[in-house]
Amino acid sequence: MGDAPSAPVPVLMYHSIGGSDRLAVRPEAFAEQLAYLRDTGRTPITFGELAEGGRAPVRPVVITFDDGYADFHERALPLLDRFGFRATVFVTTGWIRDAGPYAAGRPLGRTLSWSQVAEIASCGIEVGGHGHSHAELDQLRDAVLRTELLRSRRLLEDRVGRAVTTMAYPYGYSSERVRRAVRAAGYDAACAVANALAADGADRLAVPRVTVRAGTSIAAFERALRGRGFLVDHALTKGYAVVRRSRYAVRRLRGTV
Ligand SMILES: [Zn+2]
């Protein structure tokens, strides 16, 4: 990651701010976390800036949001703005509220509209991809995988008017085959979910993130920033990656993908 500082850079992963599922963080808790970042001298940069390398601030942190929920626009953006913080939103294009003929998959909550996505981008927030239908990318055959990645990037670029070079894997699932397809589809960097910190020189196509959930206390948040005390999510361990690879292979043999 270029000249990025050698200390691991925390990449935080949020979903909804104010929603009701187990990952949704309350706006008050989110505001407290932002204040904590400010008070400890952290400077948020976008995921794209982290991936590019170059000159980074002294204590960088990356704040990311997955899926593209409407409450990012309503709840998170005003708070980020109040702190003067940058962030990255990974949008699932088929889930956009007014996706029209491109609607795909089933969103878990109320999602952003296209005009909100454009407005967010104009506020200096980075917009990245998160698949078109939020499919488990490692379970798709090559042609479908390519469409999923390209359609998402092109739709976003049309609306935000600039290059979209980053993405996050839905559910955090990727494989070497998926990462090759991601690069071929024009993305330079991608976020995984490993509940670890992004070390200097980490694979740009599998940058680990730390999950912030509904139940994340400020003490746990502080530990997470230091790379300690992560909750281990069995679904994202190395062993489970092998299980998923085998599952894909079996489905290929059966001809179901
Ligand atoms: Zn997602």
Image (cartoon, helix red, strand yellow):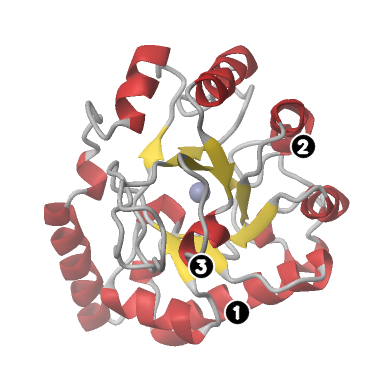
Q: Which mark is residue 150?
A: 1
103 vs 15, left or right, is right
Q: Pick the residue in front: 10 or 175.
A: 10
Q: Position of residue 152 (x, y in %)?
A: 64, 70
- What mark, if any, has residue 52 been given in the picture? 3
Q: CA distance from mark 3 to mark 2?
A: 26 Å
Q: Nearer the viewer, residue 125 or 101?
A: 125
**Residue 146 placement, left or right of 125:** left
Residue 75 point in image, percent of width and height: 73, 26
Task: State which mark lies toward you, 1 or 3.
Answer: 3
Residue underneath mark 2: 73
Q: State yes or no: discs 1 and 3 in contact (Cβ < 8 Å).
A: no
Query: How would you rate the neighbour count of disc 2 (Cα within 10 Å): few for under 14, some for 14-19, many for 20 or more?
Result: some
Q: What type is the residue that disc 1 sits on?
A: Leu
User: Which sits in the foreground, 231 or 151?
Assistant: 231
Q: Is mark 1 within 8 Å of ligand 1?
A: no
Q: Are marks 3 and 2 in contact (CB under 8 Å)?
A: no
Residue at mark 2: C-beta within 8 A of ligand 1: no
Q: Which mark is residue 101?
A: none
Residue 251, horizontal then vertical, whole percent: 25, 73
- In this rendering, is residue 246 above or below 197? below
Q: Is residue 250 visible?
A: yes
